[in-house]
Image: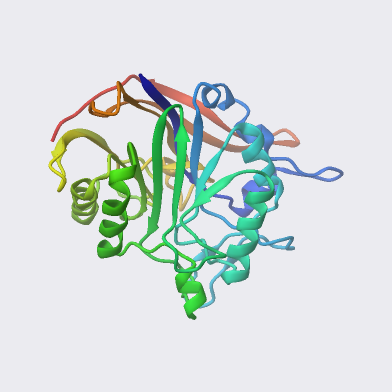
């Protein structure tokens, strides 16, 4: 039996307070302690995936800025955060989100360079072959896996063609076409979508509709990012347009994996490690999907003269299934 185990987390945010908490006078920045307590769970899987909701745009005196017109935060962080991601086990990050252009096209390109130099693969932006479908094909543990990543938009307007073509947008016709084209050659299709309403604990009607469309196009599992709080996980069965009636999965939002409390909302420091397993007895059998969710808390507090900034396990929830 071919089986692949994934650890998937939600948004990796880097606010200014988080960056300052990981700064050392003589050693620059050290983000490794942030992930130290969850690394043993990552080590149990074949791939670790998270949504990179910051850029690696180079050294700045002030990493978190604010858009003059909208007031939205604009993220950048030290390259040491990429080092910590690599050391803790992250193998893939999704980059299609509303902050991927926070430092323009130059920042998007430098982010790609930074990840590549550390051997972290990414999906959701195409800095070099702009306009090319953003997908990541893997052959892991005997399974042919393809990962897609799409975003509803970006906070910084894509003011020229190069910027627009460097991001994988949530265009329904495009998404349906790309998944349909991949289906004949893939055993597993995993789709990340940056969508939904911020701070809402229930998926919107649009989130549900988009998910149903992706399943019908042939996707096996959908992972949502952007709401910054946890939303439900659903396992169900659907028939796709190829006539295949099989198990389908969606995690509408895994919340924030790393973040400070956003606007006083304690739920924005809560997230989860989704332990997602795909298995297939042979090429002619149906794909099976199982999961376990480990809930997490991101701590950011000052203890005496030092900062305590780390992700810890809060509650463990065994595999559950809920048909709808």
Please report the residue visible at 65 percent of the width from the left and 46 percent of the height from the top: 82
Please report the residue visible at 66 percent of the width from the left and 56 percent of the height from the top: 113
Quadrant in the picture for residue 279: top left
Could you say where residue 319 lies in the image, as x and y percent from the top left? 31, 21
In the displayed structure, 158 sits above or below 277; it is below
Q: Nearer the viewer, residue 268 or 222?
A: 222
Q: Nearer the viewer, residue 38 or 124?
A: 124
Quadrant in the picture for residue 248: top left
Quadrant location, the N terminus: top left
Could you say where residue 197 lies in the image, as x and y percent from the top left? 31, 55
Quadrant location, the C terminus: top left
Residue at the farthest bottom position: 160
| Residue 308 visible in the displayed image | no
Please report the residue visible at 45 percent of the width from the left and 27 percent of the height from the top: 141
Q: Nearer the viewer, residue 161 or 280?
A: 280
Q: Nearer the viewer, residue 143 or 272?
A: 143
Please report the residue visible at 49 percent of the width from the left and 33 percent of the height from the top: 297
Could you say where residue 302 lies in the image, as x and y percent from the top left? 66, 37
Could you say where residue 34 lies in the image, as x and y percent from the top left? 62, 35
Residue at the farthest right position: 26
């Amino acid at each position: 039996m071919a089986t692949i185990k994934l650890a998937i987390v939600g948004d990796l945010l880097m606010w200014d307070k988080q960056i300052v908490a990981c700064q050392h006078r003589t050693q620059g920045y050290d983000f490794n302690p942030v992930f130290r307590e969850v690394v043993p769970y990552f080590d149990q899987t074949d791939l670790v995936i998270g949504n990179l909701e910051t850029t690696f745009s180079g050294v700045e005196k002030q990493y978190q800025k604010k858009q003059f017109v909208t007031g939205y935060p604009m993220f950048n962080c030290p390259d040491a955060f990429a080092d910590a991601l690599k050391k803790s086990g992250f193998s893939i990050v999704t980059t299609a989100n509303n902050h991927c252009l926070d430092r323009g096209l130059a920042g998007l390109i430098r982010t790609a360079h930074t990840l590549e130099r550390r051997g972290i693969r990414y999906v959701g932006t195409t800095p070099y072959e702009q306009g090319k479908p953003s997908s990541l094909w893997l052959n892991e543990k005997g399974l042919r896996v393809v990962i897609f990543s799409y975003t509803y938009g970006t906070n910084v307007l894509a003011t020229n063609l190069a910027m627009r073509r460097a991001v994988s947008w949530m265009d329904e016709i495009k998404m349906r076409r790309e998944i349909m084209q991949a289906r004949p050659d893939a055993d597993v299709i995993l789709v990340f979508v940056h969508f939904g309403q911020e701070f809402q604990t229930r998926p919107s009607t649009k989130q549900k509709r988009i998910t149903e469309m992706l399943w019908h196009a042939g996707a096996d599992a959908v992972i949502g990012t952007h709401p910054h709080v946890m939303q439900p996980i659903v396992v169900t069965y659907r028939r796709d347009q190829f006539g295949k009636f099989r198990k389908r999965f969606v995690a509408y939002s895994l919340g924030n994996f790393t973040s400070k409390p956003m606007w006083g909302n304690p739920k924005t420091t809560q997230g989860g490690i989704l332990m997602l397993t795909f298995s297939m007895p042979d090429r002619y059998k149906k794909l099976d999907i199982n999961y376990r969710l480990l809930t997490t808390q991101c701590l950011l507090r000052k203890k005496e003269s030092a900062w305590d900034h780390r992700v810890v396990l809060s509650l463990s929830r065994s595999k559950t299934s809920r048909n709808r």
